[in-house]
Image (cartoon, coloured by chain):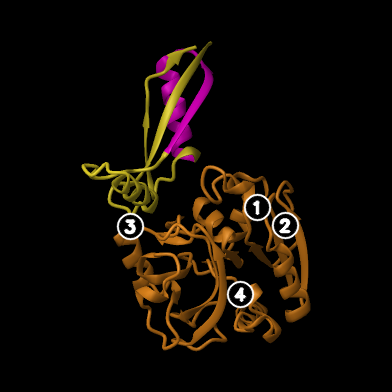
């Protein structure tokens, strides 16, 4: 399977994603420059973390108008998987691929830490190798990670099983203390209505080796492989 | 076509948590500005554009706000009258 990793000016997790796909997963990966109009036959698109366009105006607001985003939107519309991590999540929300928005962390500080998230839905193309309720250790590194949406949208996301991950403590409780950024309802990751676009603030691609503290992110990538290849 | 200058105010949507505004409010209270009830921090953007007339210039900038300058989920915008430059 071929993973296409989009590099925007200011992306800084594209190499981490490349490493995770090629070295850990053992699959093919290509970098896609944001000014191109060619997804290079990628089966899965990754919008990586970073600070595209210096977060000018709003995080992701300018990157969403990069030329390649037309092809990424068409790829998403066709039902093919898009994994949007951190800045990628911000870009996907700005582009309308996912609902809601990501605002400045409630405590105003950049948070770089290993946190825990609970798997809310294990029946997705991104989480089918996890157990529902399982607690994962995954790092976060962001200043604008507070997920917000209208109460109606939040209710819809929850009732449709589109809240995939919630910030939680070691026992799996989505407590206020376990919420690193003030996100509504402790939401850490959501799915598009068709289920093929996942946006999340935590970095699964940085949790792919016990040497780095956790390999809880590996099964997210393997889930895509098992479901899409099947 | 004439040249117009339009100022745009972008503010956090009312009712949403505004941590920047709260932090500034706290600092103002510390400085002794006790009567301050609320502070909101937003953006001020100046657009200089060519347009046939002021109304067309304002319509164009409104379109810019909807498409890029403001996030419809989290922000409100307000446009000042176009000034011919």
Q: Quadrant of residue A127?
A: bottom right
Q: Which chain is rendered orange in the image?
A: A
Q: CA distance from mark 4 to mark 3?
A: 27 Å
**Which of the pair A22/A157 is nearer the observer?**
A22
Find numbered disc 2 in the image and state the secondary structure of the residue it sits on.
loop
Callout 1: residue from which chain? A
Q: CA distance from mark 1 to mark 2?
A: 7 Å
- First in residue order: circle 4 vs circle 3: 3
Badge 3 crowding class, 10 Å Cα cut-off, few under 14, some 14 to 19, many 20 or more, is: some
- First in residue order: circle 3 vs circle 1: 1
* Label 1 sits on residue: A71
* Label 2 sits on residue: A39
Q: What label sits on residue A150 in the rendered view?
A: 3
User: Looking at the picture, how far across and down is residue A113, in whole percent?
Assistant: 55, 72
User: Looking at the picture, how far across and down is residue A54, in whole percent?
Assistant: 62, 47
Q: CA distance from mark 2 to mark 3?
A: 33 Å
**Does residue A172 belong to the magenta stretch?**
no
Find numbered disc 1 in the image and state the secondary structure of the residue it sits on.
helix
- First in residue order: circle 4 vs circle 2: 2
Residue ID at (45%, 22%): B6
Farthest residue, direction left: B35
Q: Which chain is rendered yellow in the image?
A: B
* Label 4 sits on residue: A204
- First in residue order: circle 2 vs circle 3: 2
Question: Which is more foreground, mark 2 or mark 3?
Answer: 3
Quadrant in which the C terminus of chain A is drawn: bottom right
User: Looking at the picture, how far across and down is residue A47, in whole percent?
Assistant: 63, 60
User: Looking at the picture, how far across and down is residue A194, in whole percent?
Assistant: 49, 66
- First in residue order: circle 1 vs circle 2: 2
């Amino acid at each position: 399977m071929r993973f296409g990793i989009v590099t925007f000016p200011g992306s800084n997790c594209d190499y981490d994603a490349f490493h995770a796909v090629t070295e850990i997963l053992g699959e093919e990966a290509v970098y896609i420059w944001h000014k191109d109009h060619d997804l290079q036959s990628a089966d899965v698109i990754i919008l990586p973390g970073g600070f595209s366009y210096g977060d000018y105006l709003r995080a992701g607001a300018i990157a969403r108008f990069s030329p390649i985003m037309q092809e990424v939107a068409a790829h998403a519309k066709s039902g093919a998987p898009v994994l949007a991590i951190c800045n990628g999540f911000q870009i996907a929300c700005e582009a309308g691929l996912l609902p809601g928005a990501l605002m400045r962390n409630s405590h105003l500080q950049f948070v770089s830490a290993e946190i825990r998230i609970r798997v809310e839905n294990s029946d997705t193309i991104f989480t089918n190798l996890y157990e529902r309720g399982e607690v994962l250790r995954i790092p976060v590194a962001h200043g604008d990670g507070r997920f917000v949406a209208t109460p109606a949208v939040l209710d819809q996301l929850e009732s449709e099983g589109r809240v995939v991950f919630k910030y939680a403590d070691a026992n799996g409780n989505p407590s206020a203390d376990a919420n690193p950024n003030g996100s509504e309802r402790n939401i850490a990751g959501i799915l598009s209505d068709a289920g093929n676009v996942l946006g999340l603030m935590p970095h699964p691609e940085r949790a792919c080796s016990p040497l780095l503290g956790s390999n809880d992110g590996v099964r997210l990538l393997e889930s895509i492989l098992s479901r899409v290849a099947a | 076509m004439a040249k117009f200058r339009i100022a745009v105010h972008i503010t956090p949507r009312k009712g949403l948590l505004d941590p920047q505004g709260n932090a500034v409010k706290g600092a103002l209270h510390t400085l002794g500005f006790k009567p301050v009830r609320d502070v909101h921090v937003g953006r001020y953007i100046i657009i200089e554009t060519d347009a046939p007339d002021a109304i067309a210039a304002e319509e164009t900038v409104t379109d810019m706000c909807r498409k890029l300058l403001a996030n419809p989920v989290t922000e409100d915008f307000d446009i000042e009258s176009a000034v011919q430059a």
